Image (cartoon, helix red, strand yellow):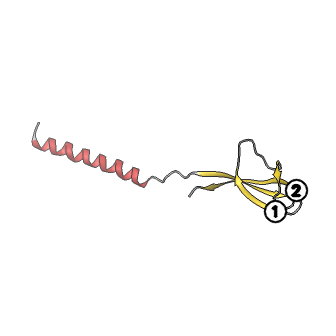
Amino acid sequence: MEESTIYLIIAVSLTILFLIYDTYRRRPRRTIYITRELLVCTKCNYRVERDAEPGDFIGLLKGKCPSCGGDLKITGIYAVEKK
């Protein structure tokens, strides 16, 4: 092999490696979300936010209110970005 061919192969290889690195560096990071639920007391309007559990759905009565003893009802399920 000639010396100029070796330099050409090295130059092309370095260019390809730089392009791969640059593409990887600019790729947006994957965002991680946590599923939360909002529970509201049916009597006194007490509100609490918790992590959602599998099988939960809006309208489910889930526990008792620590303030008045009424039922806590799931009124919202949503995802928030993990910090």
Q: Is residue 5 left or right of residue 19?
A: left
Using the rendered view, name the quadrant where residue 83 is placed.
bottom right
**Callout 1, which amino acid?**
Tyr
Q: Position of residue 41 (x, y in %)?
A: 84, 58
**Callout 2, which amino acid?**
Gly
Question: Are dots 2 and 1 in contact, CB under 8 Å?
Answer: yes
Query: Residue extending furthest top?
Result: 1
Using the rendered view, name the quadrant where residue 69 is placed.
bottom right
Report the residue at 71% width, 54% height from top: 50
Q: Is residue 21 left or right of residue 13?
A: right
Q: Position of residue 28 (x, y in %)?
A: 48, 54
Q: Position of residue 52 (x, y in %)?
A: 70, 49
Could you tell which of marks 2 and 1 lies nearer the N-terminus? 1
Report the residue at 76% width, 54% height from top: 76
The 10 Å Cα crowd at callout 1, few under 14, some 14 to 19, many 20 or more, is: some
Q: Is residue 53 left or right of residue 65?
A: left
Q: Position of residue 5 (x, y in %)?
A: 15, 41
Report the residue at 35% width, 50% height from top: 21
Using the rendered view, name the quadrant where residue 39 is placed.
bottom right
In depth, the one of 29 and 18 nearer the eye is 29
- Which secondary structure lies at badge 2? loop
> Dot 2 corresponds to which residue?
70
